[in-house]
Amino acid sequence: MATSTDARNFANYSYLALLILGALMALAGLWNIVSFITLLGYWGFYFFGGLIIWGIVLLALGGFGVFTAFTVWKPKIVDAIDQGRYEDAYRVASNPVQLIIGLICGGVIPAILLFLTQQKLAEIVRPPPPPPPS
């Protein structure tokens, strides 16, 4: 089945995209926090106060994205597709909260890939159309 292979590929790519982009966001947040601590002694809080705020926000969002990738997207979408439980994977992938988490914590790429996963799973889960009347 080409649609199940496509759904599996899109699910794997969305999981990896959320994992990688979330980790990069967390590293950028950590970089901002370290930069704030380093520059605080030279210029003071007035010039570099935004670094600590953005650092904390990026660290929290990136960490939550990585956490979601490991605890929701991998076991409940990717592994469910690998095991043939397409309805369970469709139920989780079609949840709008997961799309919003992918959009906020990973950017546009994981959200689009999760949406494409959901569309392919809908093709698999949807019952076949009734035969035409004769």
Image (cartoon, grey):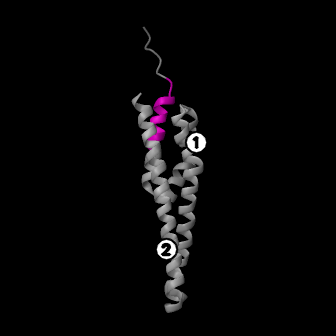
Q: Amino acid at mark 2?
A: Trp
**Tag 1: residue type?**
Lys
Secondary structure at badge 1 equals: helix
Q: Residue 66: give x, y in percent of width and height.
A: 54, 57
Is 4 part of what is drawn in magenta?
Answer: no
Q: Main secondary structure of the magenta part?
A: helix
Q: Is residue 94 visible?
A: no
Q: Is disc 2 surrounded by few (<14), some (14 to 19) or many (20+) residues within 10 Å?
A: some
Label 1: which residue?
76
Residue extending furthest toward the right = 71
User: Where residue 59 appears, x then y in whole percent?
Assistant: 55, 67
Residue 96 shown left or right of residue 14 in the figure: right
**Image quadrant containing the C terminus:** top left
User: Is residue 22 something that shows in the picture?
Assistant: yes
Going 44% across and 11% down the picture, which residue do you hit?
Answer: 133
In the rendered image, residue 121 lying in the magenta stretch gets the answer yes
Residue bearing the label numbered 2? 31
Coordinates of residue 24 in the picture (x, y in percent): 47, 63
Q: Residue at x 46, y 41 (%)?
A: 117
Q: CA distance from mark 2 to mark 1?
A: 32 Å
Q: Earlier in the sequence, mark 2 or mark 1?
A: 2
Residue 66 vertical placement versus 29 (above, below):
above
Q: Report the span colored magenta.
A: 115-127
Give the residue at x 44% y 36%.
Answer: 120
Q: Quadrant of the N terminus?
A: top left
For the residues bearing labels 2 and 1, Cβ distance under 8 angstroms: no
